[in-house]
Image (cartoon, rainbow, N blue to C red):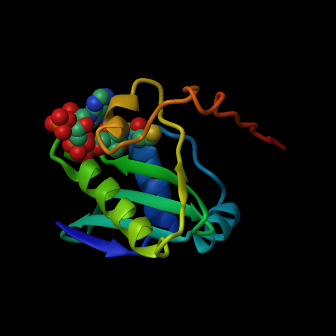
Amino acid sequence: MEFKENAITTEIYHELRSSVEWMNFNVEQTAQGLSHSLYSLAVFDAEKPIGMGRIVGDGIYNIICDVVVNPDYQEKGIGTEIIRRLLYYLKEQTPENGRSSIQLIAESGKEKFYEKFGFETVPNEASGSGMRMIIRK
Ligand SMILES: CC(C)(COP(=O)(O)OP(=O)(O)OC[C@H]1O[C@@H](n2cnc3c(N)ncnc32)[C@H](O)[C@@H]1OP(=O)(O)O)[C@@H](O)C(=O)NCCC(=O)NCCS
């Protein structure tokens, strides 16, 4: 098993999203999106891509997205290792006396997976609900 930084190609992205039955984006939008990643990880078993995760953001506000492990490889700790490494990257990037915010939207029922790392669901005492809008054309 090999973890490679910033190595997600359009093909890998499409293949892994399809493996968990997520919709895909066209080639142009995918390439543009990937090129704007702050940091990403692709996981390989020999040459086969089996997992990925991405951070999109500016170091102050950061979104973890596209966390996927191919179903044949799930429940083996790979997803945990992806998140652990993404968080390590952000901790290293956060300057002394600085602060950075990490956000994500858990798939329905996946909250527990993220709570282990310290993520909190909102709303809570300090914050209202997370909100989002999808634009479709
Ligand atoms: C979510 C996902 C990335 C987890 O990857 P994984 O490699 O199977 O996760 P791990 O093997 O590291 O599991 C880690 C822990 O989370 C738990 N876990 C995994 N999937 C879970 C789920 N759906 N609900 C609750 N807990 C879950 C495991 O039981 C394990 O618990 P443990 O540490 O107490 O043993 C993977 O299931 C996946 O790709 N799912 C489809 C896409 C998806 O939903 N991505 C997340 C978007 S928010």
Q: Is residue 74 visible to us here?
A: no
Residue drawn where x is 50% and y is 56% of the image: 14
Left or right for 18, reference 101: left
Instruction: Specify the quarter for ligand 1.
Output: top left
Q: Position of residue 105 (x, y in %)?
A: 54, 38
Q: Position of residue 114 (x, y in %)?
A: 36, 39
Residue 91 in which image quadrant = bottom left
Left or right for 61, reference 113: right
How many numbered discs sit on the rendered protein? 0
Q: Is residue 2 visible to us here?
A: yes
Q: Position of residue 29 (x, y in %)?
A: 69, 62
Residue drawn where x is 64% and y is 28% of the image: 129
* Quadrant assignment for the C terminus: top right
Residue furthest to the right in view is: 137
Residue 100 in which image quadrant = bottom right
Left or right for 54, reference 75: right
Residue 134 in which image quadrant = top right
118 versus 121 height, above or below = below
Left or right for 49, reference 72: right
* Quadrant assignment for the N terminus: bottom left
Residue drawn where x is 59% and y is 32% of the image: 126
3 vs 50, nearest the viewer? 3
124 vs 6, nearest the viewer? 124
129 vs 109, nearest the viewer? 129
Q: Position of residue 115 (x, y in %)?
A: 35, 36
68 vs 54, nearest the viewer? 54
